[in-house]
Image (cartoon, rainbow, N blue to C red):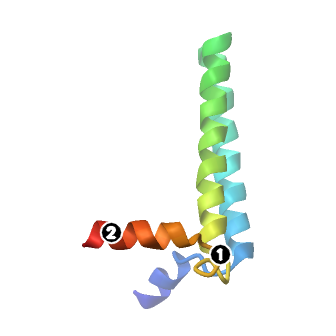
């Protein structure tokens, strides 16, 4: 069970890039299906929504796998978090 759990954890940026690539392939495939089902602007908007979701998710994954992700945060982020806890 521990071995399977370890496979599901993204530890390095290389692993993150492979996961993002796989997500992008799936999103483009789904977007092409939308273009066939909904020709015109509607299909293109759904296609862009699929690929846009990969951009947002990929950015978050890359940010979380950065070695010094805590050091590059703004001080304002920490102040807001403290105020929410109080």
Quadrant assignment, res 5: bottom left
Q: Is residue 58 above or below residue 78?
A: above
Observer-nearest of 78 and 39: 78
Residue drawn at the location 62% of the way across and 81% of the way down: 71
Can the viewer see residue 14?
yes
Residue in the picture at 72% in, 56% down: 21
Instruction: Tell me the residue that label 1 is attached to.
Output: 72
Image position of 14 (left or right of 71): right
- Residue contact between numbered discs 1 and 2, judged by CB atoms under 8 Å: no
The image quarter in which residue 83 lies = bottom left
- Vertical comparison of 63 with 4: above or below: above
* Identity of the residue drawn at 24% across and 72% down: 86
Residue 28 place in picture, x, y as percent: 69, 38
Give the labeled residue for mark 2: 83
Apparent side of residue 80 relative to residue 86 in the rendered image (left or right): right
Q: Total marks drawn?
A: 2
Q: Quadrant of the N terminus?
A: bottom left
| Label 1 residue SS | loop
* Residue 40 drawn at (x, y percent): 68, 10
Q: Secondary structure at mark 2?
A: helix
- Nearer to us in this view, 30 or 17: 17
Q: Nearer the viewer, mark 1 or mark 2?
A: 2
Q: Residues within 10 Å of mark 2 (few under 14, many from 20)?
A: few
Residue at image location 53% in from the left, 78% down from the top: 9
Pick whichever of labels 1 and 2 is earlier in the sequence.
Answer: 1
Q: Is residue 39 visible?
A: no
**Direction top: furthest residue:** 40
Q: Which residue, as the protein is rendered here, is positioned at the far bottom?
A: 2
The span from disc 1 to disc 2 (Cα, nearest Å) is: 20 Å
Q: Position of residue 30 (x, y in %)?
A: 62, 35
Please tell me how crowded label 1 is: few (under 14), some (14-19), or many (20+) other residues with Cα within 10 Å.
Answer: few
């Amino acid at each position: 069970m521990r071995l399977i759990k370890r496979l599901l954890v993204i530890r390095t940026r290389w692993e993150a890039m492979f996961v993002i690539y796989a997500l992008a392939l799936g999103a483009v495939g789904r977007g092409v299906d939308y273009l066939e089902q909904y020709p015109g602007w509607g299909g293109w908007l759904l296609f862009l929504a699929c690929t846009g979701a990969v951009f947002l998710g990929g950015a978050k994954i890359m940010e979380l796998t950065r070695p010094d992700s805590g050091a590059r945060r703004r001080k304002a982020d920490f102040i807001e978090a403290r105020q929410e806890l109080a």
